[in-house]
Image (spheres, grey):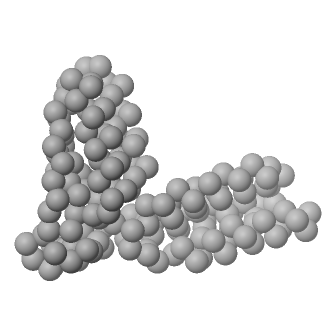
Amino acid sequence: MEERACWVLLAYRLPREPSTPRIALWRKLRQLGALQLLDGLVALPASPQAREQFEWLAESIVEAGGGAALWLAEPAAKGQADELEAEVQEARAAEYRAVAVAAERARSEGQTGHGRTLGRLRRELRRIRARDYFGAPGRRDAEAAVESLAATRVAL
């Protein structure tokens, strides 16, 4: 199996009530950049870290009264693998664009809270880079926009 073509899948079901475990799971999956394939089925590009994260999530799902299973899978067709990768890349590219826009807006508006904004945008960039599995476009632009905001703050 090609490394890039292999995916770790988490199939899960959780009771509707209480909703807290469902919300916590959704937030963690979003933080990891997991791709929602179907209701109750998410995927990440295969890596030891992805597998470990899904194992932890599976344990928490079972502890919350649900069921979970981990799978290693490879799309049957190259086109499917390419679609999955493109979907992950587009999600990260959109996040990079949002950071760049926020940094440019803050710089052009001359916000007095640059320190908080700058810190928030730098943290967001770190989180996006952690789930940027395929080198999505827009990373350099977002980083440049944030550093431009930092340079503006220094000049003030």
Residue 46 to residue 24: above or below:
below
Residue under the point 39% across and 43% down: 28
Residue 42 to residue 27: above or below:
below
Q: Horizontal and vertical percent for residue 96?
A: 52, 67
The answer to whether residue 4 is left or right of residue 126 is: left
Snapshot quadrant of residue 83: bottom left
User: Residue furthest toward the top?
Assistant: 18
- Residue 35 seen from this side: no
Snapshot quadrant of residue 19: top left
User: Residue furthest toward the right?
Assistant: 156
Snapshot quadrant of residue 92: bottom left
Residue under the point 17% across and 59% down: 72
Most foreground residue, 73 or 149: 73
The answer to whether residue 125 is left or right of residue 64 is: right
Residue under the point 69% across and 67% down: 146
Residue under the point 36% across and 25% down: 20
Q: In which quarter of the image is the N terminus?
A: bottom left
Q: Horizontal and vertical percent for residue 23?
A: 36, 33
Most foreground residue, 147 or 2: 2
Q: Horizontal and vertical percent for residue 112?
A: 84, 52
- Residue 141 seen from this side: yes
Residue 80 to residue 33: above or below:
below
